[in-house]
Amino acid sequence: MFPSLATLKLAARAVLVRLRFPLLVAGIVLLLAAWPWLRHHFDRLTRARAEIDTSVSSDTEYWCPMCPGVISDWPEKCPVCHMALVRRKKGEATPLPDGVVARMQFSPYRVQLAGVRTTAVEYRALVLEITAAGRVARRGEELEVTIDVPEGDMAALAVGAEAEVTSESYPGQKFAARVGDLAGEVSPEMRSLRARLDLPPARELRPGMAVQARLRVPATRLPRVSRAVHDDWRERTAADLALGSLPALAVPVPGMRSLLQGAGAMALHHRGLALCVPATSVIDTGGRKVVFVESMPGMFDAVEVTLGRRCGEHYPVLGGLAAGQQVVTSGAFLLDAETRLNPALAASYFGAGRSHLAERPSAEDQQLIARQKTCPVMGGPLGSMGPPVRVVVGGRTVFLCCKGCEPELRRSPGKYLANLPKTEP
């Protein structure tokens, strides 16, 4: 006699109760075993859409909304915040301010690793020292010293300027002097200007003695520094007045802020204080002088500046910087070297200098990259490890994800060339 249906259901339920844990474990094992197959099919279904969003184009670039200094020609993640870069047209790039030649951003770890230190641009009492050898002579009842000052220091000389004279015969002793007269022309042979220093009567000094003269000229008395302060005041006030005259930007007293700022700068100038930047912050490329300014934490702008004669450990600032800005004093040369060795860190803004940036692939190479898509050696997408590397093997142009794949490709070209898409006839 066969068991009833109720008995069969009761037996099946008892079996499921006893085997529920083994069945759960078996299901998890099957899911793990089939996971690569499931992921492969999921990627195939979504790849078409992804390829549309990440195609390489000469009209687009990728940037990070959280870190505006991060821009790339290839789809990747932001090295600072690890956010996926967003695609945009190159015409939408934000222009850099005037004078900024490059912009880059580093993570806090890289800033610390490079030993980057900043300091504020400030006013200091700078002094330009001019030294020249001379000889003591007698003029009537007084003594004088005739010196030849190099042509480059002419602008710092003025009748009545104070000086001091020292002699090897009296080490440690200084004799006060004053510029009494300047020659009317520059010596064409020596390219120097002759100056006469008046000395008060001194028992130690005698005519014919060789001496060393030193002139200490405050930087604020140099013509270029004074002219720069006046020009900056005039230009700022004129711009403020022009903007204030517009109806949309009208203010109760247009130009007042610029007038007050200019008056403060002039007051500091008359007190002998000049706006300056440390000499360790300045990178002289030969054609221009650049200072790295920290515009926000971790973001540095390479700013072109105009500087005066070096005075000790500082340069007077004639243009390009303002008081209070944070400039890099330690690690500036490392930042400049990083932009040259790793151009991906530098932002391709409109108006930025292109001298430190990597050269973009040609239009023909970009088409080949878009058609090839992946590295034949590693199988990863091109651009995932930086700009693709162009290699010619067997008369065929091939792009790799990095330089490390080139030796392997040349060792077994047939093996890896078979992974490339078929060329059109």
Image (cartoon, helix red, strand yellow):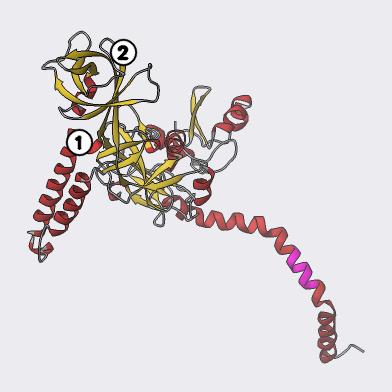
**Front residue of this view, candidates 232 and 349:** 232
Residue segment shown in magenta: 23-29
Residue reaching furthest to the top: 189
SS label for mark 2: strand
Q: Nearer the viewer, residue 148 or 47?
A: 148
The answer to which quarter of the image holds residue 192 is: top left
Query: Going by the picture, which residue comes out furthest to the front?
Result: 203
Q: How many marks?
A: 2
- Is residue 257 rendered to the left or right of residue 419? left
Q: Nearer the viewer, mark 2 or mark 1?
A: 2
Main SS type for the magenta part? helix
- Tell me the residue that label 2 is attached to: 210
The percent position of residue 221, horizontal first and vertical second, equals 20, 36
Please tell me which residue is depicted at 23% across the width and 10% down the height of the picture.
190
Residue drawn where x is 85% and y is 80% of the image: 18
**Residue drawn 65% across the image and 56% down it:** 37
Residue 221, numbered circle = 1
Query: In the rendered structure, which amino acid carries the disc numbered 1?
Result: Arg
Residue with the most extreme right position: 1
x and y percent of residue 422 in the render?
51, 35
Residue 32 placement (x, y as % from top left): 71, 61
Between discs 2 and 1, the one toward the N terminus: 2
Residue 369 visible at all:
yes
